[in-house]
Image (cartoon, helix red, strand yellow):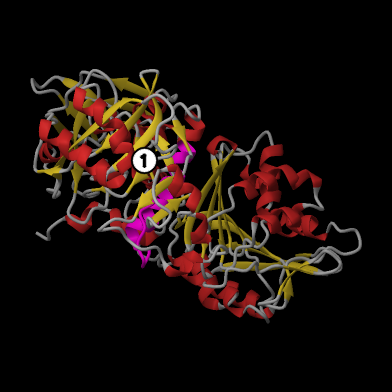
Amino acid sequence: MTAFASPVQWLPDGIPHNPRFNDRYRGDGDDGLGGILQARHVFLGGCDLPGAWRDAPRWTLLETGFGLGLNFLATWQAWRADPLAPQLLHYVAIEAWPPTADDLQRGAAPYPELAPLAHELAARWTGLLPGFHRLAFEGGRVQLTLCIGEVRAMLRELRFEADSVYLDGFTPALNPDMWDPHTLKAVSHLCRRGTRVATWTIARSVRDGLAQHGFIVEKAAGLPPKRDCLRATWDPPWTPRRPEPAPVAPWAGGDRRALVIGAGLAGASAAYSLAQRGWQVTVLDRAGAPAAGASGLPAGVVAPHVSPDDRLLSQLSRSGVMATLARAADLLPEGVGWAASGVLERRLKDSRELPSDWADPASPGHAWSRAADVVQRSAAALSDDSPAHWHARAGWVRAPALVAAMLAAPGITWQGNAAVAALRLDRPQAEGAVDDGEGWTALAADGTVLAQAPVVVVAAGFDSLDLLASADAPALPLNPLRGQLLYGPMPDAPHPLPPFPVNGLGNFITGVPVDGTPSWVLGSSFERGCREPVLREADTAEVAGKLAVLLPESARALAPQIASGAARAWAAVRCTVPDRLPVVGALDATALPGLFVSTGMGARGMTLAVLCGELLAAQLAGEPLPVPLRQARALAPQRLLRPS
């Protein structure tokens, strides 16, 4: 996928055409309504929507070819108009050649009822690099997971049960890979018994391929001028063999109560994501207030990691940026609790290059990160030839404010001054006992019961190590990483401080309201192996020295404030693992059912915690994951456990 030009060619009659496959995206006919009528008749009608989803708490739909998004927009509109629609609509769509945002809006232009939805979709349609992109609408009640890539490769990265399937794509004669038996087999692996499938084609090869893989196929009246369309239901007469399951099996218990240990970003994010799915969550923390540990920093940078080969951490960081900034936008006032300001990254000694093709302005990577321009360097008081990246989709967030807002969500009970010393798994005492189910008990040091629930999520940073040991869980290689930063009031204008965050040797944020005062935040030192958040004078000099390299003019402007002691120091202990990736998932679902962990985010908690909370909650709910399956497996605790 290296061609960056739009795949859409608009014909003189206003019909969108794809030169790659020499086929039209739709055929509108004389009335110009063919596209929306096909979406409603062939796809929604073929899956008995909206009727089939009524009384369901959630509905999950898979589409094999997103195209110009007309089926998604029509489904979204039907969901919005239906008072009996499910609380949550998951729409997972695959597209190898995404159109531009302008193409999306132009494609929906003939249908006024879809225009507002198309405008909202187009506003977020940017930076669509290969992989998964989670876009949330309607306050998170409509979730669109865009899987950018070839259909077979993307289907392999999905693990969920679809309630409905739209098989869409260019005609089988011109785009056979979209319809061949291997693709249809992969689709069948994502179906449950009773899943309904709809498509416009009645090609014999498609009918045979569906039947071969367990679908009961029937022709139905088509939308003129087509005589027929195809409908199918997955109900194989054999017991199907499923592919390798996801890292965490969906929670099968009816009791949806959870304990979360730790009230920082990781814990609050997990609690919020579970509560949004109807769980009752109790959050325990030893401190008297939330975000008392590493998440208590005055403000943090949310920016993508870059690498010339676009490695796993880089891909995860982009998903994390999207999740964190979307969550902040939902819960915090912009400019006070967060800002999508963009971030400048100095290319210093150990900085990484961008992928080479991102230099092309048409590349989706260019929308994420590109070479900084003269104006951006000048705003940071850097010379015109200072090498730097500009991360357009980045910003800053006040972590304590985000934590507080998440913990205030309905369904969450926060309990401070509750130091958990041990976790105990309580197993049923008698077979078939009604109210004697398996679950977890959080105990204080004196043995007092603090809380109980069938599910517990350990999200206590480095303290997770001792908590997991108390539960007889396998040992994870967690390591403490102490960091110290400085912050202080903004100097009087004019000053050379940049209007946006700068990183590359630590990071520097300006204009952040801290205790009501516009402030700057500078961090941080890194001390491995230290478990205590002590303040060290030497670290103040170290952090100030980093600023002198990163932004010399800013360092000179703040030197008197730092030297006089007007700047304040703050320290905390973060948690890391050797491969620098977070740890998310179940440790041992058989021996320790209901025990989960979300930790090890190091200095990237601001960027990754919200994503990790969503991943954990999606796994427990059996929902489509916000990241590809291979990435979820790369974060699972099992990668770090030594074989016994």
Q: Identify the image quadrant of residue 159.
A: bottom left
Q: Secondary structure at mark 1?
A: strand
Label 1 packing within 10 angstroms: few (<14), some (14-19), many (20+): many
Q: Is residue 336 magenta?
A: no
Position of residue 412 measured from the top left corner of the image (x, y, whole percent) = 38, 25
Q: Is residue 58 above or below residue 46?
A: above
Left or right: 488, with 140 as reference point: left
Q: Is residue 324 magenta?
A: yes
Name the image quarter holding the C terminus. Answer: bottom left
Q: Identify the image quadrant of residue 594.
A: top left
User: Which residue in the protein does label 1 denote?
Assistant: 301
Position of residue 499 measured from the top left corner of the image (x, y, whole percent) = 44, 37
Left or right: 465, with 70 as reference point: left
Position of residue 262 measured from the top left corner of the image (x, y, whole percent) = 25, 31
Name the residue rendered at 70%, 59% in the picture: 103
Magenta residues, dominant SS class: helix
Q: Is residue 174 above or below residue 415?
A: below
Give the magenta-colored segment's residue range: 304-327
